[in-house]
Amino acid sequence: MRVVLLGIFATGLIAQFVKPVGDALEGKATLGGALLSLVAYVLYDALKELTSSVRLPARGMVNSRDLGGYVSEAFRARKVEISFLGYTGETLYNELYHRLEGLMEDSGLTRRVTVRVLVPDFGQPMTVPSRVGEGGAPVDDPEFRRRLERKIQEYDQILAGLAARLTGAGRMTVQCEYRVYSGIPRDKICIFNREQVLHGLYDVMARTVLNSSDPEFYDPKGYNTDLNVWTREGGSADDTAIATWIKHFDDLWSLAEAPAWRRAPAD
């Protein structure tokens, strides 16, 4: 494009001073055309530079704080299915709570909602979360685990209550279920309507202090976790990745069990 524009400019300019060329181009607005081509050349360069500077960033990775947009998008469907594997799921819980409450006022197109949440079994000894011991060694802390378990139990009961109210109203069917897995919270996986998958890795060495007089604890911060994004619009590679993550989650879900607060007491 630059060569063409410069060629037009040069030809028009020469035609003004070289008679044979001018005669050949007689009847053409040679000088005006030459000037216009020069202006076009300058504008072309400027436009190209501007386009490069405002190019949108690739959406291959997002922060956990962006989950709200994905939850809202998922709830535009008639059948909503959200699956989560992670630590406490606090960030997702807050978004789900507001979306389910919103369905009380306006259900829109939504007629079925299924939410599955996989969290660690905090009833077992763990290396993460744990108390930071001498030399940074992890020391299992039952009280800290129970604190996290009580928080998740509250999330479960609140979402289950909303699900029962929405289903009881007769306009839709809503199911929210928690299960637990063994092991440390390493992966954070969010699957939306089996069309989008977000995955990231927790910082398992992240530390926190509850009070100034308390020791440090290894306590991953989910809201700081960056997440890779796969969507159906991403092509065959993304489709393959989505299918793999969905199968991985479904398999873990099948192997998981209900949390302690939902298990029937032994006879």
Image: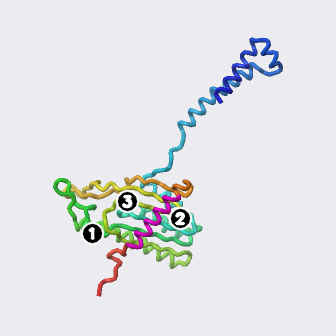
Label number found at residue 146? 1
Report the Cα–Cα distance between label 2 and label 1: 32 Å
Helix, strand or loop at mark 1: helix
Q: Position of residue 235 (x, y in %)?
A: 56, 54
What amino acid type should be assigned to the residue bearing mark 2? Phe
What amino acid type should be assigned to the residue bearing mark 1? Arg
Report the Cα–Cα distance between label 3 and label 1: 21 Å
Q: Position of residue 161 (x, y in %)?
A: 43, 75
Residue picked out by circle 2: 75
What amino acid type should be assigned to the residue bearing mark 3? Asp
- Quarter assignment of residue 64: bottom left
Q: Residue at x 83, y 20 (%)?
A: 27
Residue picked out by circle 3: 187
**Label 3 crowd bin: few (<14), some (14–19), many (20+), radius 10 Å:** some
- Quarter assignment of residue 86: bottom left
The segment highlighted magenta reads 239-255
